[in-house]
Image (tube, rainbow, N blue to C red):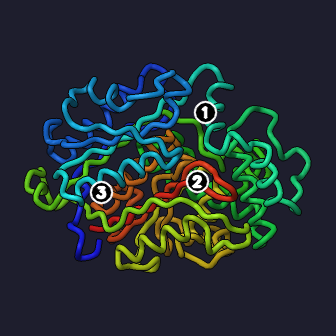
């Protein structure tokens, strides 16, 4: 950050594989991620002075509507310290991280934990998909739908391009974003498929990813439709999983097993949207939040080595690559199709495989992105390593308000 702020570091990260774990509960997933982060940093449970627990669906699915973090963390030995419960839709994990960073930066303590866990699979499909119904204004549902459908006006879905099976409300939301982008900028369904094929290709080399199968662009286009222009491989799955990060002050680095593996937090920004017209793309919540983050970090988009962005669907990655300044507005589809966002390209995006392949356990997603960036910045990503990675950015969005995400979290990390 700027010279007035003390530097905060990520000392350790941990993450479970992402997938369908019917035999593991929130407590087990949380414990696995936290133990991995503690081991990574070389810290003990007793070193943690404050904890931020993120989860979005346990209230709906299990009835655990309060004190989720206290229950998950005390079951593994955390006592006495302050524990906070963070719900910020799909941006819950990075919101928890931002608060942990603020805690350390303020001088309130030296070491803080951010952990997100989500258990989304259940045998009742309707209940499972209903968790998304509360991620927009429930008092204005019909109005919300009207606004989104208007965004996509003028792009008619071809015959047979809509699913009969149930799916998340957010797929309709992203489809509207996609049709708007197609109408406004000439983006093609093939370009959206290129993002998906690239991310599935990246995930082959990520042992923690939910899906590890490569797809060609043609296979993505030929896959079962969800809601036009989206097909199944373009959409993030339902996922169980957990991820954690431990942040600390400069003074606490002395306690680390190997302080050379500490990663600097250069910016952590959480923003709320503004009212705008769909055409005012430069005022998008992510465009505004990332400008602030770049300013705080003292760098620009051209300095970034790699990015993890919130591709709940493939069109999301196209939109966010523009908002983060990697190309002009309207050129995100072209950037992906040209290979520029593939590992080895100009700006590798979603080296983890992204939400489409790595999975999307809502409350853990933002911390999962940071797990990937830390692994890359340490040079420990194996076959998916971005050579010479020095600066990395994560974009994590959540919920919907008006024409865009309700919340956006941007994190910039450096070696």
Q: Secondary structure at mark 3?
A: helix
Q: In which quadrant of the rendered image does the N terminus lie?
A: bottom left
Check if mark 1's residue and mark 2's residue have beta carbons within 8 Å: no
Disc 1/disc 2 C-alpha distance (Å): 16 Å
Residue named by callout 2: 406
Q: Nearer the viewer, residue 38 or 170?
A: 170
**Marked residue nearer the N-terminal end (3 or 2):** 3
Residue positioned 32% across, 68% down in the render: 266
Where does the image place residue 116, in percent across and percent down from the top left? 39, 40
Disc 1/disc 3 C-alpha distance (Å): 29 Å
Q: Secondary structure at mark 1?
A: helix
Residue named by callout 1: 131
Where does the image place residue 377, in percent across and percent down from the top left? 31, 63
Residue named by callout 3: 102
**Marked residue nearer the N-terminal end (1 or 2):** 1
Judged from this view, the residue extending furthest toward the left is 254
Numbered tag placed on residue 2 in the rendering: none
Q: Nearer the viewer, residue 5 or 411?
A: 5
């Amino acid at each position: 950050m700027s010279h007035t702020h003390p530097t905060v570091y990520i000392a350790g990260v941990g993450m479970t594989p992402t997938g369908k774990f019917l035999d593991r509960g929130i407590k087990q997933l949380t414990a696995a991620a936290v133990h991995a982060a503690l081991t990574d940093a070389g810290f003990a449970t007793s070193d943690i002075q404050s904890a931020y627990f993120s989860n979005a669906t346990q209230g709906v699915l299990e009835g655990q509507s309060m004190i989720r973090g206290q229950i998950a963390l005390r079951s593994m030995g955390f006592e006495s310290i302050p524990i906070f419960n963070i719900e910020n839709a799909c941006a819950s994990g990075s919101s928890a991280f931002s608060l942990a960073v603020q805690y350390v930066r303020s001088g309130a303590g030296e070491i803080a934990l951010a952990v997100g866990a989500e258990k989304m699979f259940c045998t009742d499909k309707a209940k499972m998909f209903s968790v998304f119904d509360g991620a927009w204004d429930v008092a204005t549902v019909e109005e919300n739908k009207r606004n989104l459908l208007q965004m996509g006006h003028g792009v008619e879905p071809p015959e047979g391009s809509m699913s009969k099976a149930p799916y998340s409300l957010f797929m309709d939301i992203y489809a509207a974003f996609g049709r708007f982008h197609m109408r406004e900028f000439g983006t093609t369904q093939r370009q959206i498929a290129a993002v998906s094929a690239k991310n599935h290709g990246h995930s082959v080399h990520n042992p923690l990813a939910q899906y590890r199968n490569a797809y060609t662009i043609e296979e993505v286009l030929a896959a079962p439709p969800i809601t036009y222009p989206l097909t199944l491989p373009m959409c993030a799955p339902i996922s169980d999983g957990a991820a954690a990060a431990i942040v600390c002050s400069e003074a606490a680095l002395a306690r680390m097993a190997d302080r050379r593996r500490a990663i600097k937090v250069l910016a952590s920004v959480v923003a709320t949207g503004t009212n705008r017209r769909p055409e005012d793309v430069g005022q998008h919540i992510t465009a505004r939040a990332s400008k602030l983050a770049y300013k705080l970090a003292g760098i620009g988009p051209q300095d970034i080595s790699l990015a993890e962005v919130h591709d709940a669907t493939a069109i999301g990655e196209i939109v966010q690559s523009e908002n983060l300044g990697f190309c002009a507005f309207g050129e995100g589809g072209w950037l992906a199709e040209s290979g520029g966002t593939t590992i080895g390209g100009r700006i590798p995006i979603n080296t983890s495989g992204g939400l489409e392949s790595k999975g999307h356990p809502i409350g853990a997603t933002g911390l999962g992105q940071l797990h990937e960036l830390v692994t890359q910045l340490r040079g420990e990503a194996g076959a998916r390593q971005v050579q010479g990675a020095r600066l990395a950015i994560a974009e994590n969005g959540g919920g919907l308000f008006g024409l865009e995400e309700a919340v956006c979290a941007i994190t910039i990390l450096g070696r």
